[in-house]
């Protein structure tokens, strides 16, 4: 049944939900193309964590937007980390050739980090404040939701 939820989210850009939290974000340490990334090392930054896969249609639209957010707010402390869940990196490489990322790509092929975040669909995104608290989550990605998510980023950057 979990697989069908992913398919529903992938095939419909209309699916979107947001939740507000106030809980510690699950830590992670994952490989990247060059080394590794650990959430604890990002304390003091606003972290936008995005779980994605190469087969995710809404991810094709979220990648240019995440690159834009990274460029626009990096100087203010935003760090975008996109965690890929594909088991085979060749699919990741093909996706990134078409949708290049100006942010960190981490790899979680076993889905352990996704499980700790209770990922329910693709893409799933989380905003983690500079103290390591999980503040917001989003399931799905729509063009009409970009301004809402950006406003959450701006609000949390001001709180720093």
Image (cartoon, rainbow, N blue to C red):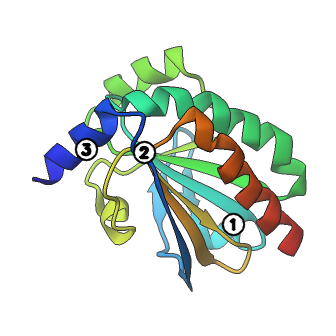
> In front here: 114 or 142?
142
Residue that numbered label 3 is attached to: 6
Residue 42's label in the rendered image is: 1
Residue 52: x and y, percent?
41, 42
Residue that numbered label 2 is attached to: 123
Residue 120: x and y, percent?
31, 57
Residue 122, can we see it? Answer: yes
Lower position in the chain sequence, tag 3 or tag 2? 3
Left or right: residue 59 versus residue 54 is right
SS for callout 1: helix
Residue 160, can we see it? Answer: no
| Contact flag, marks 1 and 2 (Cβ < 8 Å) | no
User: Badge 3: how crowded within 10 Å, few (<14), some, or many (20+)?
Assistant: some
Left or right: residue 147 versus residue 81 is right
Left or right: residue 80 versus residue 109 is right
In the rendered image, the residue lying farthest to the left is 1
């Amino acid at each position: 049944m979990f697989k069908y939820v992913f398919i529903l989210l992938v095939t419909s850009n209309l699916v979107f939900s947001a939740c507000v939290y106030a809980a510690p974000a699950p830590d992670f340490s994952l490989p990247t193309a060059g080394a590794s990334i650990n959430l604890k090392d990002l304390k003091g930054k606003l972290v936008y964590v995005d779980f994605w896969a190469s087969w995710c249609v809404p991810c094709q639209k979220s990648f240019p937007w995440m690159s834009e957010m990274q460029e626009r707010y990096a100087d203010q402390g935003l760090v975008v980390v996109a965690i890929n869940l594909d088991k085979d990196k060749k699919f990741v490489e093909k996706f990134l050739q078409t949708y290049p990322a100006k942010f960190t790509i981490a790899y979680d092929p076993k889905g352990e980090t996704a499980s700790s975040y209770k990922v329910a669909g693709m893409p799933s995104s989380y905003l983690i404040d500079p103290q390591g608290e999980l503040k917001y989550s989003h399931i799905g990605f729509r063009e009409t939701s970009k301004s809402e998510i950006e406003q959450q980023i701006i609000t949390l950057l001001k709180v720093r």
